[in-house]
Amino acid sequence: MAGRKQHFIPQALQRGFGVAKGKKRQVYVFKKGQEPYYSSTEGVAAQRDFYSGPSDEQSLDDKITIYEGTVLAPAIAALREAPAGPIDSHVAAAVVVHLSIRSAFVRGSFSAAATEMLDHFADAMRSDQTARALLEVDTLKSESMLVKLIEEDILLQFDAIPESGRNALAKLVHFRAREKFPQMFPDLAAMVLQQFGMLLEKIPEMIVSGHSKALERDLAPALRVERLKAMNWQIIAAEPSTHFVLPDCLAVGSKSSNFQEMEPYSLLSDDELAGVVMPVCSDKVLVGCFGNPELDPASLNRSFAQCSLDFFISSQADAQTAEAAQFIGSTVSKYVDSLVEEQTFAAPEKSGSDGESPETEGRAQEPVQVPIKFEPSSRKSSKAQAAVRNLMNAPELQVGLRTVEAIVVSDNIVRSLRQRGVALNDYAAQVVKLGTCHTTETPHGVSSQLFVTTEAVNLVTKDHPLARAAAALIRHQAGRATYYATVASRIPKETLQRQRPLLEAIGLRIAHFFCSHYFGGRLSGIGLVSEEEFAATDGLYCQTLAGCVQGIASARLHFIEHRDVDAALGLALGHVEQLLCATANACATTGGKIDQWKASKSIEALQAVSLGEWFELLALDLERFFDSRESLVGDSDLILLGSHIERVLWSFGIALSTPAPEQIWMDVLADEKLENTRLMLRV
C-alpha cells in the first residue's frame, strides 16, 4: 500500500530542479505572495490522501505509484539524460499528459473558476435586470432555460392537446412569467442564493471526486496523447548561466507556434493547441509543436510563473527568479475572468443617455447639413430654416441625419407624400399628418426623408407657448431616422431580409414602426415633462387606448359574426399597431421610466383589459433595446418586441398561430373563455 503523503508532482520530476543534500534533494519553493523557502522534495507538492485514503483494495494512489515506477520515472530519466535535439513523440506525449492531469493545479484552477462563476451568478441574482439575463427570461430562443422549462411542463400537463395549442399556451405562460418577474424576483432570488451557497460549500468535494474519477478511468487519456504524439518533439537546453523553473501546472501550451502567449496546457483544448513546453530539469525543457518552434528560452521562466496557480519550484533563488515569482497566478486569473466575461447575463450597458450616443459622446461634431424644402415654397423663410437647423444640431441625431435626403416642411404632409408616389390609405394618412420619417432601402442601408408640418415650425419660430412640444415633434422624426440608421448599420441586411414565418414577418414590421417612435421620443430632446405636460400626454394616450380597445374588440366580433379571417385580422393588427405605437410614445415621454404612469388614467384603462403589467414589460423591453442599440448583432430583440402583438391580442380573446410558415391561423374565444383568460392575465 502506498503512503498517505501523496505527491501530485512526483519527486522523480522535482529532483531535476534540486540540489543534493546527503541522500535527499533540496529545492526552492516560490509561493504566491510569500518569500521563497528551501525544502526537501519529500515535503513539496504533497498532500495527505490527495488521491485516495487507506484501502484494503488497490487504491488510485496505488495505481499511480505503480505507473510512476514502471512507466513515468524511467521516461522522465530518459528525457532528462537526452541531449538537445529530437525526442521520441510517444514518450513525450505520455509524460506531458499524465503529469498535467494528475496535478493539484487541475483541482485548484477548476475550483477557482467554479467559485468565481458561482459568485458571479450570485451577484447577478442580486439585481432584477441581471437576474433576468442570467435566467434568460427575456428571450424566445428554444435553448433558453425558461423556455425549456415552460415547454417541458406544458407537454407534461397538456400532452393531449394539439401541438399548436401547446405552443400558444407556452407563449402565453412565458409572457406572464416575464410580466410577473418583478413580483416573483425577491422570493426567487432568496431561493437561488441559498442554493448557490450550498453549492459553493460542495465545490471542493465535487472537484476532488471528479478529478479522482477521471484519473481512475485513464492516467493518460488517449485522445490527448494522440494529439501530442502528432507533434514534433525536441529537448532544448538552457543558455549558459540560466536555469528553468518547474510550474505547478507542469506544462504550458500555446495557440501558435511562435509561443508568444502561453497558458497552462491543462486549460487548453486539443483543437486550439499548437505547441507545448514542459521543463524536465533545471537546464532542459521538452518542446513539442507542429512546425519549427520559435522559442526564446530566456523568457520561459516568466511564462512558467504566470501559468502557475500557487507556486513553482526552482534550483536557485536568484533575483531574476524572484522577479518572475511576482507573476504567479496571473494567467489563471485572466482565464477565470474570461470565463466570467463570456457570460451573457450582465445587464445591458447603456449606449448613452437620451442625449449623446457613444459615437458622438465627448466629441464636437459638425452638424449634418440636410437640405430643407418648403411646400409650398412660399412658406420658405430664413427664420424658419434657422429654427429647423437649430433643432437638428443635437449630436445624438447626427447618426440618423447622415441618412436623410431632405427635411420637408409641408402644409399638407399627406399631399406631399402622395406627390412623391407614396400610396396611403385612410389609416396611414391619419398616422402621418402630424409628421413622419419616410424610409426606403438602398444598397448601402437606408435613406430617409423627414416630413414636418409648417404649423409646428411656425410655433417654434414664434416662441409660442406650445413651441417646446412642437420642437419635440420635429426632432421626433429625426430620432426615428436614427433608429432606422442604427438598425441598418448594426444588423446585417441578410438577417433582416431572410425568409421567416408570416406572423414573425408582420411582427418585425410592426416592431420597426413602434421602436422607431420610441427612439423618436427618447431623442426628441423634451427632457423631463412637467405635471401639466404629463397630464396632457396621459389624456391623449387614454383617448388613443379607448379607440384601439374598441377597434380590436370590433375585429373579434367581426370574426365571430362573419368568419372573415382576412378582414378581422387586418382590422385587429391595424389597431394593435396603433396601440403599440402609442404605448411606445408614452414610455418614451417619461424617459423609459414608468413610475409616473402607475397612477395614471391610462394604466387604469389598460388594467381593465388585463394589460397593466404588460405595459411595464413593454417599457422594459424597449428601454433594454434602446440602451443596447450600439451592440446590436441580430434580430432576436426585434422578434421579441414583435411578439407583443400576440400578447395584446390574447387580452381580447384572439390567438394567432402559424400552421404553415406562409399562413396565420386565428382563433377567437367565446365571451366566457375571454373573461377567464383576462382573469388569468391579471393574477
Image (tube, rainbow, N blue to C red):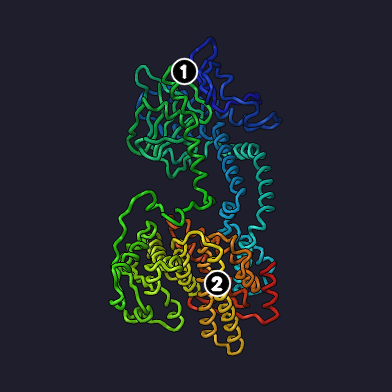
List the single residue furthest toward the top.
Answer: 22
Camera-nearest residue between 22 and 612: 612
Camera-nearest residue between 403 and 142: 403
Q: Which residue is painted at 45% across and 53% down in the image?
A: 352
Camera-nearest residue between 517 and 91: 517
Find numbered disc 2 in the image and state the secondary structure of the residue it sits on. helix
Q: Visible in this render: residue 151?
A: no
| Location of residue 52 (image quadrant) | top right
The number of callouts visible is 2
Q: Amino acid at mark 1?
A: Ser
| Residue position for label 2 | 541
Camera-nearest residue between 105 and 57: 105
Q: Which residue is painted at 42% across and 80% down in the image?
A: 429
* 546 lies left or right of 445: right
For the residue carrying disc 2, how many other residues have a C-alpha within 10 Å: few (<14), some (14-19), or many (20+)? some
Q: Mark 1 or 2 closer to N-term?
A: 1
Label 1 with label 2: CB-CB less than 8 Å: no
Q: Which mark is residue 315?
A: 1
Q: Which residue is painted at 41% across and 64% down in the image?
A: 479
Find numbered disc 1 in the image and state the secondary structure of the residue it sits on. loop
Q: Amino acid at mark 2?
A: Tyr
- x then y, percent, for residue 433: 42, 77
Q: Visible in this render: residue 627?
A: yes
Quadrant in which the C terminus is drawn:
bottom right
Q: Look at the picture and state if 543 lies above or below 191.
A: below
* 138 lies left or right of 322: right
Label 1 and label 2: CA atoms lie apart by 79 Å
- x then y, percent, for residue 586: 53, 67
| Location of residue 1 (image quadrant) | top right
